[in-house]
Image (spheres, rainbow, N blue to C red):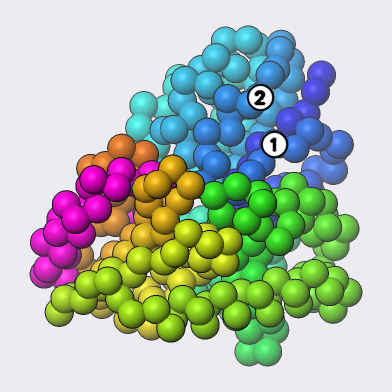
Amino acid sequence: MRCIDVFNGDADGICALHQLRLAEPVEAELITGVKRDIELLKRVSAGPGDEITVLDVSLERNRAALVKLLGCGAHVRYFDHHAATDIPDHPGLNAMIDESADICTSILVDRFLGGRFRIWAVVAAFGDNLGNSALRLAESLKLDIDKRDALRDLGENLNYNSYGETESDLLIAPADLYRIVKRYSDPFHFISKETLIRQLGRERTSDLQKALAIVPQRVSSTSDAYLLPDEHWSRRVSGTFANHLAVAEPTRAHVVLTRNAQDGYTVSVRSPPNAKISALDFCRQFPTGGGRQRAAGINHLEPLRFEEFLRKFEEVFANC
């Protein structure tokens, strides 16, 4: 029997797996990648009795590969908070899916483990831009403000490292980052011992300052759109920048488009809580669109659809 861990390379995926493996230590094959590399189950080869754990990876985008693995006799445990339709009904699948806007995968794992390693769920929620959820979890742990701020920085630094078109855009490959995190049960020990996390913090701050210096492509009374250049730093900071905009102006809609190697655009959309249409529903109107309710994206927007996209974005979020 083989054990295979499949996880998103962002803060949520890494912290979700870390919680599970602190509770259930096992040597497993690791399959992960940059945040937008979500069709990860296509890379899994498994047979009868193999145990596959999937974390923070869209079931909707991996359904065909999941059905194939189940048909081969593998057992799959699936934790996720992204939109999921038509979940397979199969005895080999244990799916724990919750699409609520205030939930991330690490919170689902925290529930599953009865809060045993909740502090890592706090890190993940901060990294996934779920500040209120993170603060609620931190409150249950009686963490003071300095410790909460340290966990916020850690989560945002881990998440920052996940954005990129390929792993060459990142400062460290997600699998290698997980292997470093895996050494520590205490996140404060991790913060104090690992110079890497401080390097990530410095680079995140530098990249964010570059993004903040860019003039918006379009601004309306209820939304704004930014276009970032085709650079390593801009691909790294795209999600962090979108989250920053959403926190700074939570009643507005925001979109960050980044030029990619396919001569198109990678898109991050953030919608306010009172919007009539969610970021997810908006992005689903375009091929390769997906995500979660208020934070969604498009993996590749064709260049010919750029102006059309911006017009639709302004129209849809005109009444935020």
Measuring 37% from the left and 60% from the top, which residue is drawn there?
257
Q: Which residues are magenta?
A: 293-320
Secondary structure at numbered mark 1: strand
Of residues 185 and 169, the one nearer the viewer is 169
Q: Is residue 141 left or right of residue 192?
A: left
Of residues 231 and 276, the one nearer the viewer is 231
Q: Indicate yes or no whether the magenta region holds residue 304.
A: yes
* Marked residue nearer the N-terminal end (1 or 2): 1
Write down the residue under mark 1. 31
Q: Is residue 305 above or below residue 151?
A: above
Crowd class of label 1 (few under 14; some 14 to 19; many from 20; radius 10 Å): some
State the image coordinates of residue 252 (x, y, percent, origin top left).
25, 75
Label annotation for residue 44: 2
**Disc 1 residue type?**
Ile
Measuring 82% from the left and 19% from the top, which residue is drawn there?
1
Q: Are marks 1 and 2 in contact (CB under 8 Å)?
A: yes
Which quadrant holds residue 200?
bottom right
Of residues 194 and 234, the one nearer the viewer is 234
Crowd class of label 2 (few under 14; some 14 to 19; many from 20; radius 10 Å): some
State the image coordinates of residue 298 (x, y, percent, origin top left).
36, 48
State the image coordinates of residue 283 (x, y, percent, origin top left).
29, 49
Measuring 52% from the left and 39% from the top, which residue is drawn there?
38
Q: Is residue 7 above or below residue 89?
A: below
Q: CA distance from mark 1 to mark 2?
A: 8 Å
